[in-house]
Image (tube, grey):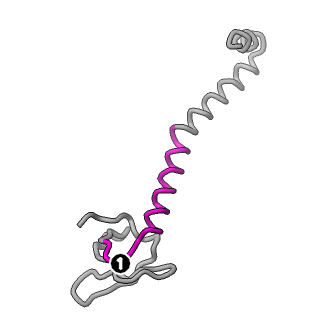
């Protein structure tokens, strides 16, 4: 089979070009697209798993503890008696205690 493809590629340069394009697309998929999709899934799972008591870091650099989880936002305590509303997608990551 591989010899047939190599023979076809030498007889018709268009076949060789298509094979190279397919190879490059496959390589790009496994090196760029697939890891990005995995990271997006992990981030969505992290956002779904937010709960009161979790320590978080926001995209703006605030560090705080979640006090209340709502549909689209969360309340975060950043200091004694200071709570701010943060959109869930504004959470960069959860922190270990």
In the displayed structure image, the side of residue 15 where residue 79 appears, left or right: left
- Residue drawn at the location 31% of the way across and 69% of the way down: 61
92 sits to left or right of 40? left
Q: Quadrant of the N terminus?
A: top right
User: Where 10 sits versus 79, above or below?
Assistant: above
| The magenta segment | 31-54
Location of residue 36 in the rendering, given as x and y in whole percent from the top left corner:
51, 49
Vertical side of 12 occupied by 63: above or below: below
* Residue 88 position within the rendered picture, expressed as x and y whole percent measured from the top left: 45, 73
Question: Main SS type for the magenta part?
Answer: helix
Residue for point 74% across, 11% down: 4
- Which of the pair 93/67 is nearer the observer? 67
Residue that lies at the very extreme toward the bottom in this rendered image: 81
- Closer to the camera in the image, 30 or 11: 30
Q: Position of residue 6 (x, y in %)?
A: 69, 12
Q: Quadrant of the C terminus?
A: bottom left
Give the residue at mark 1.
52
Mark 1 burial class by Cα count in 10 Å: few <14, some 14-19, many 20+: few
Q: Does 48 appear in magenta?
A: yes
At x 50%, y 56%, the residue is 40
Q: Is residue 94 above or below residue 16?
A: below
- Give percent across and percent down for residue 82: 27, 88
Instruction: Report the label total.
Output: 1
Which element carries disc 1, helix, strand or loop?
A: loop
The answer to whether residue 70 is above or below residue 12 is: below
Say which quarter of the image contains residue 81.
bottom left
Residue 21 lies within the magenta run? no
């Amino acid at each position: 089979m591989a010899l047939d493809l190599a023979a076809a590629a030498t007889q018709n340069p268009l076949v060789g070009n298509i094979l190279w394009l397919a190879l490059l697309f496959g390589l790009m998929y496994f090196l760029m697209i697939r890891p990005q999709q995995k990271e997006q899934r992990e981030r969505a799972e992290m956002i779904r798993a937010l709960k009161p008591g979790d320590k978080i870091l926001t995209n703006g650099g605030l560090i705080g503890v979640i006090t209340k989880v709502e549909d689209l936002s969360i309340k975060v305590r950043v200091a004694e008696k200071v709570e701010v509303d943060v959109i869930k997608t504004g959470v960069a990551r959860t922190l270990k205690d």
